[in-house]
Amino acid sequence: MEDGLIYYRRKLYNTMLKWKSERNGDTALLIQGARRIGKSTIAEEFARNEYKSYILIDFSKVSKEVSDLFNDISDLNYLFIRLQFIYQIQLHERESVIIFDEVQLQPLARQAIKHLVKDHRYDY
């Protein structure tokens, strides 16, 4: 079983590298799979290795303040400034990624992804 997991992780990482180089921020990347197989871990590892900075928003344990930011995304500058302040991370245009973990728990954030990708500042 362990060999299968290593293969899965390597294959997923290579898929993510291909997405980053070919799509150049034109699409978000959705990682799906069974629970507890390391999707979040590999997403964070990829972000750490392949980007200048990243923010990981885990909607299973996010603060109300962060969750509420997605109630109104009409001002993306405000959204990004608040996220950088809350997470104490500086985002860099086209060199940072924002990871939404457990995004199914926050439907407004999931809906926002289309607009965030269109903005093209960061990867998702």
Image: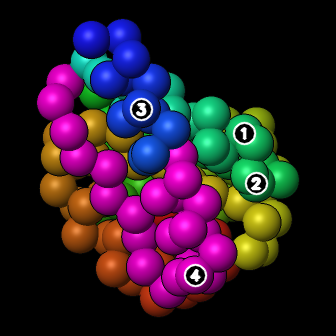
Can residue 79 be seen?
Answer: no
Say which label, 4 or 1, has the lower sequence index. 4
Q: Are the two marked residues, 4 and 1, in contact with CB atoms closer than 8 angstroms?
A: no
At label 4, which amino acid type do we have? Answer: Glu
Q: Position of residue 61 (x, y in %)?
A: 35, 23
Mark toward the viewer: 4 or 1: 4
**Magenta highlight range:** 13-35
Locate residue 108 relative to residue 27 in the image: left or right. left
Outermost residue on the front side: it is 3
Give the residue drawn at x 71%, y 60%. Answer: 96
Give the residue drawn at x 74%, y 74%. Answer: 94
Element type at marker 1? Answer: helix
Can residue 84 be seen?
Answer: yes
Q: Nearer the viewer, residue 13 or 50?
A: 13
Element type at marker 2? Answer: loop
Q: Residue 95: name its quadrant.
A: bottom right
User: Is 7 covered by the magenta stretch?
Assistant: no
Q: Position of residue 62 (x, y in %)?
A: 39, 30
At label 2, which amino acid type do we have? Answer: Tyr
At label 1, which amino acid type do we have? Answer: Arg
